Image (cartoon, rainbow, N blue to C red):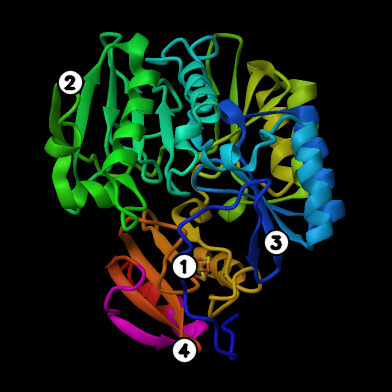
Amino acid sequence: MIATDRPLAPDVKGWCPSALRPMAAGDGLIARIKPTAATLNADQARVIAEAADRFGNGQLEITRRGNLQARGFDAAGHARFADIVLTCRLAVPDAAAEAVRTVLAAPLSPTEDPSCTLDAHGIARAIEAALVADRSLRDLPGKVGVAVDGGGVLPLTTGGPVETADITIAGTADGAAVLRLPADGDGRFAEIAVPSPGVAATAVRLLHAFKAQASPAHRRVASLLEEIGPDRFLDAFDLPWQWRETPAAVSSLGVPRFTRLSTASGAMIAAPAFGRLPAEVLVALADIAEANGDGTVRLTPWRAAVLPGIAAADAALVRTEISALGLIVDACDPRLRVFACTGRPGCLHAGADILTDAAVFSAALPEGATLHVSGCAKGCAYGRPADLTLTADNGGYDLVRAGRAGETPDLSSLTRDTAIAAIRRSGR
Ligand code: SF4
């Protein structure tokens, strides 16, 4: 629904909430859990879900960094929730260390998927440990993060940098590793070749280099590179690097399915619509992971949950159970091609109830098209151009074709019905 009262203008906060430092939102405080190596065990998932329901509003969401965000706390409720997160060992007690412990890992390790090109979980753990131990990195800007892409059957990208990361680590076919810096406005990025054993340490050295060269205006590595370029940034490193082109986004990356990892078993991928995972659904997912999988739930930056260790013989049954929870298990579901932000009431900057409208718009979306539905020009849900972008503004929606939120619209002041008609027309 489009809101009639005027939303607040969007602002740039420059930091992300953590479990210990919540952020104010339209529906109360939000807290973000950063699972190490993308993994929650079933007990952790159940306890966190129950705490989010008891002390918050029970609305959890998987973020584009593969984090688990809980919403709707007051200050006292958040304090109780934070204690439980610490008891579950899903955060470190030092709030400044927790703020910089931002390492996104691919969902599977080489022991689970032998086609992985590197041990994403081991490298992620090593980088997290260095970030927590190194007091000189405590004042890194709040959004800086590292991604570790292990490749294999569930890679984070198809050969480019992870969109939300400042440094992306990936493996190569010959057993080496590469570090990717963020892409520039033309889609080019610098790729640095490094020996695989030292890759975690090199990533931490790059973070130190960023800290040494960044001014307060440089909140991300991308903004520093924009000013000085990779040559100067990498000046102190005796490492070979080359320009690479960012591959096109592949919509089939991480789509819901059962993917075999051996002849007898595999991993089930399930996607909550628009990343929203109500507490009771997370509890049920944890129960399924324990009963049918390896007892863990993995979170991904494409806002899905992965349950490894599912016997191939049980895959159909598990799929049915997950579908009954309301999670997307069909790779053709149009909601997988729709990116939607929190919207109202969760975000005070939103001009509409984005999640409700996105569900309606999804049904009109032509096959293969991508749609970004944004509550305001900030466009939090999707950083790339989408085929169609609808941005709530002034009591209606602006439509941008082949662009991003905030760009000059092709159509303005659409009602929900005229927006639906425009989405349908785009397929002709
Ligand atoms: S894009 Fe959505 S979530 Fe982000 S500030 Fe705007 S309304 Fe809020």
Q: Residues within 10 Å of mark 3 (few under 14, many from 20)?
A: many
Number of dots carrying numbers:
4
Q: Residue at x 19, y 54 (%)?
A: 185
Q: Is residue 151 above or below residue 405?
A: above
Gap in angstroms between the C-alphas marked 2 and 4: 51 Å
Q: Residues within 10 Å of mark 1 (few under 14, many from 20)?
A: many
Query: Is disc 1's CB within 8 Å of ligand 1?
Result: no
- Residue 75: give x, y in percent of width and height: 78, 60
Callouts 1 and 4 close, C-beta under 8 Å: no
Which of the marked residues, 2 or 4, is nearer the chain's N terminus? 2
The circle on residue 29 is: 3
Q: Is residue 147 magenta?
A: no
Gap in angstroms between the C-alphas marked 3 and 1: 23 Å
Select label 3 or label 1 by which is in front.
3
Select label 1 or label 2 by which is in front.
2
The residue beneath circle 1 is 373
Q: Is residue 28 above or below residue 368?
A: below
The magenta region covers 405-420
Residue at disc 2, secondary structure: loop
Q: In this rendering, does residue 184 appear at all?
A: no
Residue at disc 1, secondary structure: strand
The circle on residue 394 is: 4
- Residue 106: give x, y in percent of width and height: 48, 28
- Is residue 48 rendered to the left or right of residue 204? right
- Residue 55: give x, y in percent of width and height: 84, 54
Q: Quadrant of the N terminus?
A: bottom right
Which of the marked residues, 3 or 1, is nearer the chain's N terminus? 3
